[in-house]
Image (cartoon, helix red, strand yellow):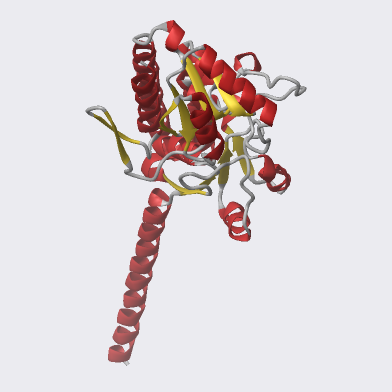
C-alpha cells in the first residue's frame, strides 16, 4: 500500500512538472511569434512599396501589386490582387486618382473596416498642382518633388505605429532616416539642375508626369499626353509640340519606361531632336537594375536611385 501511494505521488508530481514545462514552452513560443510577427502590407506601385519598405524595415512584409514598367493609370486589379488585398492588414496607395481603376476596390475594402491609406493624404492641398479643366482634381505624380514625397513618410510611420505600437521607435527612426535622405536628394538635384542654363531647362516627355519636377527644379515641362495616360495625344497637339521643339532648339526629348515610345519617336524624327534617354515616371526599375550615366551608376530599383538616374540623364542630354 505504501509503495502504491508513493507511485501515485510521484506520478502526480511528474504531471505537474510536465504541465509547467508545457505551459512555459507554449508561452515561449507565443512570445517569439508575437515578437517577430510582421505587419502584412500591400502597396500599389513600386514607388509606394519602396517608401513603405524603408520605413517598415524588418517589422513588415510588403507585397507590391505593380512591378517595373507597369502604368498605374491603366492598371486593373486581378482576382489574385483582390485576394491579396483582403489578406493584408494595411493597404497603401498613392491616391489623387493615380490608381483610377482601383478606386471602387479601395472604397469597398475601407467600408469593411480594412485600413486603406493614401500616402498623398500627408500633403496639404495648397502644395498640390491642379489639373487644368478638371474641378478639384490634382496631379498625382507627387514623388517628382522630393520635398512632397518626404511628407508622405509621415502617414506611413503613423500607420505602422498605430498597427504595431511595440515597434513605434523603429518606425520613427526609419522614417527620420528616409526623410533626411530625401532632403539630401533634393539638395543634390537642385545643385545639378542649376548647372544647366535656364534656357536649356525644357523637358519634353511622353506624358505630363513631371510638373512637380518642373516646379521644384525650375524646368519648363511639356507632356505629349495629359496627366493620365488614359488620354491620347491628338494630331494638332503633336504638330504644336514639334513646332515648339524647333522654335526653342531643344536638343533632346525623352521616352518613359511605363509609356509606349511610338509617339515620342515620331516627334523625334519629325523635329530632328534626339531621344535623350528613357526616364522612369510611374514605376521604378527592377530590383538591383543598375543604369549608368557617364561614369555614375544608379540602382533604379530604389526611389533615390531612380530619381538620380532621371536627373543625371536629363542634364547630360540637354547640356
Residue 313, horizontal then vertical, whole percent: 36, 26
Residue 257, horizontal then vertical, whole percent: 47, 39
> Does residue 158 show up?
no
Residue drawn at the location 34% of the way across and 23% of the way down: 312
Residue 233, horizontal then vertical, whole percent: 66, 32
Residue drawn at the location 61% of the way across and 46% of the way down: 75
Q: Which of 30 and 136 is in front in this view?
A: 136
Residue 78, horizontal then vertical, whole percent: 62, 56
The quadrant of the image that shows the C terminus is top left
Q: Which residue is farthest top?
A: 198
Residue drawn at the location 55% of the way across and 25% of the way down: 142
> Does residue 246 show up?
yes
Q: Nearer the viewer, residue 8 or 174?
A: 174
- Image label count: 0
Residue drawn at the location 62% of the way across and 39% of the way down: 73
The quadrant of the image that shows the N terminus is bottom left
Q: Residue 296 sits in which quadrant?
A: top left
Q: Which residue is farthest bottom?
A: 1
The relative height of residue 307 versus residue 290 in the rendered view (above or below) is: above
Q: Which of 293 and 239 is in front in this view?
A: 239
User: Is residue 38 found left or right of 121 in the rendered image?
Assistant: left
Amino acid at each position: 500500500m505504501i509503495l502504491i501511494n508513493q507511485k501515485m505521488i510521484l506520478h502526480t508530481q511528474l504531471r505537474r512538472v510536465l504541465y509547467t514545462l508545457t505551459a512555459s514552452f507554449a508561452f515561449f513560443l507565443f512570445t517569439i511569434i508575437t515578437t517577430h510577427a510582421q505587419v502584412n502590407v500591400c502597396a500599389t506601385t513600386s514607388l509606394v512599396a519602396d517608401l513603405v519598405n524603408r520605413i517598415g524595415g524588418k517589422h513588415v512584409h510588403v507585397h507590391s501589386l505593380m512591378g517595373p514598367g507597369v502604368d498605374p493609370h491603366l492598371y486593373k486589379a486581378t482576382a489574385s490582387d483582390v485576394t491579396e488585398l483582403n489578406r493584408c492588414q494595411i493597404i497603401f496607395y498613392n491616391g489623387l486618382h493615380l490608381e483610377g481603376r482601383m478606386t471602387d476596390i479601395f472604397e469597398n475594402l475601407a467600408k469593411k473596416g480594412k485600413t486603406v491609406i493614401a500616402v498623398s493624404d500627408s500633403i496639404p492641398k495648397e502644395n498640390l498642382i491642379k489639373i487644368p479643366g478638371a474641378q478639384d482634381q490634382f496631379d498625382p505624380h507627387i514623388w517628382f518633388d522630393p520635398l512632397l514625397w518626404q511628407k508622405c513618410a509621415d502617414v506611413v510611420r503613423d500607420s505602422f505605429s498605430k498597427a504595431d505600437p511595440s515597434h513605434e521607435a523603429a518606425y520613427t527612426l526609419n522614417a527620420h532616416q528616409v526623410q533626411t535622405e530625401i532632403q539630401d536628394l533634393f539638395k543634390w538635384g537642385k545643385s545639378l539642375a542649376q548647372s544647366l542654363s535656364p534656357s536649356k531647362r525644357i523637358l519634353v516627355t511622353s506624358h505630363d508626369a513631371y510638373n512637380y519636377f518642373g516646379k521644384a527644379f525650375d524646368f519648363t515641362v511639356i507632356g505629349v499626353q495629359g496627366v493620365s495616360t488614359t488620354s491620347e495625344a491628338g494630331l494638332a497637339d503633336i504638330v504644336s509640340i514639334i513646332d515648339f521643339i524647333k522654335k526653342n532648339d531643344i536638343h533632346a526629348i525623352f521616352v518613359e519606361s511605363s509609356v509606349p515610345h511610338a509617339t515620342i519617336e515620331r516627334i523625334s524624327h519629325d523635329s530632328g531632336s534626339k531621344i535623350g534617354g528613357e526616364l522612369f515616371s510611374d514605376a521604378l526599375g527592377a530590383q538591383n537594375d543598375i543604369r549608368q550615366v557617364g561614369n555614375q551608376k544608379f540602382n533604379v530599383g530604389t526611389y533615390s536611385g531612380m530619381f538620380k538616374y532621371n536627373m543625371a540623364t536629363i542634364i547630360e542630354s540637354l547640356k
